[in-house]
């Protein structure tokens, strides 16, 4: 359970959605969560935790218990941002009843305010079932990491994909999601999609006109080797860490560490 002090100042869903722009970042650990909390409106505990922290080749290797463990850490070490948790692969596809059971487990075990699911028309009935049972749901369209086969691609350039994206956004809004992440969707199409819905669209490799943007925090800090057209490094974490580690190594070898001040 979260301590009551953590709940007092936390942003509500209504407050976040009413903002002119929504800043979204990921967090999986206490140190990153506490840093991000000062600036983000929404923190996503994403299943990207698998590739980013564990070196998994796919988000499909992440399980429910892993998501709960990391989400609990993020909730307990933040006090401002709204926390959303990815439902991992295999936790919601089998049936809407299983999806509800697992969604409730995530929320009750962590104190998060909402969950995120990947997909549109195929999981329409599941999302309706979740929202009718008072589960806050965030949608995710475009490139779906849990379904990815091969290299990432841009979505929405051909007629079939355009038609499906329009339909999926319509259905997700009808099902009651409070926002939708659009990942790697063709910019010109995104600009049109924005006008087709009343709910906020959150971009990642989409358009700056989206109401919000989301990115993996470790990517913008330069903590990972990940590179794509939409990624931008704002800090060279790895370079600076290597300098610090080399300095420590040199101090140890030269018997400069620990010195008198660092000994009991």
Image (cartoon, rainbow, N blue to C red):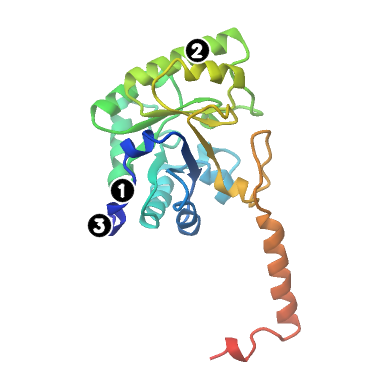
SS for dot 2: helix
Q: Give the residue displayed 31% in from the left and 43% down from the top.
A: 107
Q: Quadrant of residue 183?
A: top right
Q: What residue would you read off at disc 1?
A: 111
Can you give x and y, in whole percent of width and height, for residue 25 in the image? Answer: 50, 44
Comes first in the chain, label 3 or label 2: 3
SS for dot 1: loop
Labels 1, 3: front one: 3
- Marks 3 and 2 close (CB-CB < 8 Å): no
Labels 3, 2: front one: 3
Q: CA distance from mark 2 to mark 1?
A: 34 Å
Q: What crowding class fits label 2: few (fewer than 14 Cα within 10 Å), some (14-19), or many (20 or more)?
A: some
- Marks 2 and 1 close (CB-CB < 8 Å): no
Q: Give the residue displayed 55% in from the left and 19% down from the top.
A: 191
Whether 145 is drawn above or below 168: the answer is: below
Q: Is residue 12 left or right of residue 67?
A: left
Whether 224 is drawn above or below 97: the answer is: below
Q: CA distance from mark 3 to mark 2?
A: 43 Å
Q: What crowding class fits label 3: few (fewer than 14 Cα within 10 Å), some (14-19), or many (20 or more)?
A: few
Q: What residue would you read off at disc 3?
A: 4
Q: Is residue 219 left or right of residue 9?
A: right
Q: What residue would you read off at disc 2?
A: 164
SS for dot 3: helix
Comes first in the chain, label 1 or label 3: 3
Can you give x and y, in whole percent of width and height, for residue 38 in the image? Answer: 45, 53
Residue 189 badge: none
């Amino acid at each position: 359970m979260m301590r009551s002090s953590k709940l007092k100042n936390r942003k509500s869903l209504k407050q976040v959605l009413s903002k002119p722009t929504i800043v979204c970042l990921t967090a999986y650990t206490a140190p990153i969560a506490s840093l991000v909390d000062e600036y983000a409106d929404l923190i996503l505990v994403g299943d990207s935790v698998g590739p980013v922290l564990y070196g998994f080749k796919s988000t499909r290797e992440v399980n429910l218990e892993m998501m709960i463990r990391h989400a609990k850490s993020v909730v307990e070490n933040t006090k401002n941002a709204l926390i959303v948790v990815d439902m991992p692969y295999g936790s919601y596809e089998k049936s809407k009843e299983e999806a509800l059971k697992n969604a409730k487990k995530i929320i009750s075990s962590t104190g998060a305010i909402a969950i995120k699911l990947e997909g549109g028309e195929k999981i329409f009935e599941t999302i309706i079932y979740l929202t009718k049972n008072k589960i806050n749901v965030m949608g995710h369209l475009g490139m779906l990491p849990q379904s990815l086969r091969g290299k990432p691609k841009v979505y929405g350039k051909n007629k079939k994909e355009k038609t499906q994206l329009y339909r999926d956004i319509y259905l997700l809004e009808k099902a009651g999601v409070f926002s939708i992440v659009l990942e790697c969707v063709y910019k010109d199409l995104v600009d049109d999609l924005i006008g087709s819905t009343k709910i906020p669209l959150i971009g990642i490799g989409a358009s700056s006109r989206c109401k919000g943007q989301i990115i993996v925090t470790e990517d913008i800090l330069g903590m990972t080797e990940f590179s794509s057209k939409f990624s931008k490094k704002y800090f060279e974490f790895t370079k600076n860490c290597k300098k610090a580690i080399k300095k420590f190594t040199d101090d140890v070898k030269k018997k400069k560490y620990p010195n008198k001040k660092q000994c009991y």
